[in-house]
Amino acid sequence: MAGTPDNFSSTTVAIGPGKLYAGLAIPGAGGRLILASDGTPDITQNPSALHLGYTEAGTEWKQSHTLTGFKADESNFDIVSRITDEQASISGSLIQIMDFDIDVILNPLNVRSNLAGTHGATLGGLTTFSYNSVAVIFPIEGSSPTVYGVFHLYKAVNDAGSAAKITSKALGASPFSFKGHAIPTRAAGDQVGRKFRQLAGAAS
């Protein structure tokens, strides 16, 4: 009788460092984020892409769902369950808090504004905002030539605002949490994002 083969593989684990990008294009149906050979977003597909710089301790991808169970009077166990909530997010803490191109992504109600001799942003009074397409990209351990893993949210907004403690004892770091939102015009199962790893020999 044959046994079940082991499935140990170092090329399917996730380990950083990774890079976080915003301003990405939303791929069409059946498409994905295209990467250049160095693992960065392809500039032809993503002309507005922006690397969000250093993080305090990397990024965290989180995907979760809430399962609600329903019981019958005749059973102590659930007899039917339904998914009643789904969440997907990319979170962490950014430390380049004085880069105001990054600031207006973290704070979508802020407005980029440079006055003479300054780079900056203004805030207050807006009630509408734009969503952002964000992804974290990281090299796959042990791959040669290097291929990459990607967690991509098509439509997201940072719901953590920004904050930083200014002290001589540590870098000022602003927590962020990009929360994914559904695009209902896309096919079911592909409305929020895509996660993938390139295969050996992939060109993009």
Image (cartoon, grey):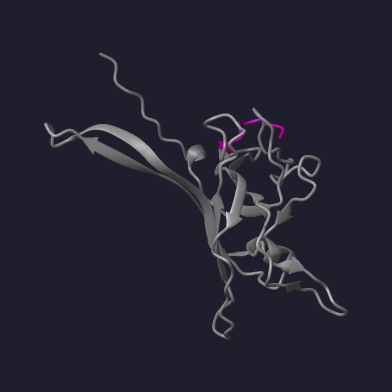
- Say above or below: 145 vs 62: above
- 95 or 120, nearer to the observer: 120
Q: Residue at x 80, y 47 (%)?
A: 47
Residue 28 picture location, percent across and down: 69, 32
- 18 or 26, nearer to the observer: 26
Q: Residue at x 72, y 32 (%)?
A: 203
Magenta part, dominant SS: loop
Residue 159 picture location, percent across and down: 55, 60
- 175 or 80, nearer to the observer: 80
Left or right of 138, for residue 15: left
- 126 or 134, nearer to the observer: 126
Residue 131 picture location, percent across and down: 65, 52
Q: Residue furthest right?
A: 116
Picture quarter with the N terminus: top left
Q: In this view of the protein, can residue 116 be seen by the observer? A: yes
Q: Residue at x 64, y 41 (%)?
A: 146
Q: Residue furthest bottom?
A: 168
How many discs appear? 0
Residue 117, picture quadrant: bottom right
Picture quarter with the C terminus: top right
Q: Residue furthest left?
A: 74
Residue 201 lies in magenta, yes or no? Answer: yes
Q: In this view of the protein, can residue 59 be seen by the observer? A: no
Q: Which residues are magenta?
A: 195-204
- Say above or below: 118 vs 181: below
Q: Residue at x 60, y 50 (%)?
A: 156
- Say above or below: 102 vs 173: above
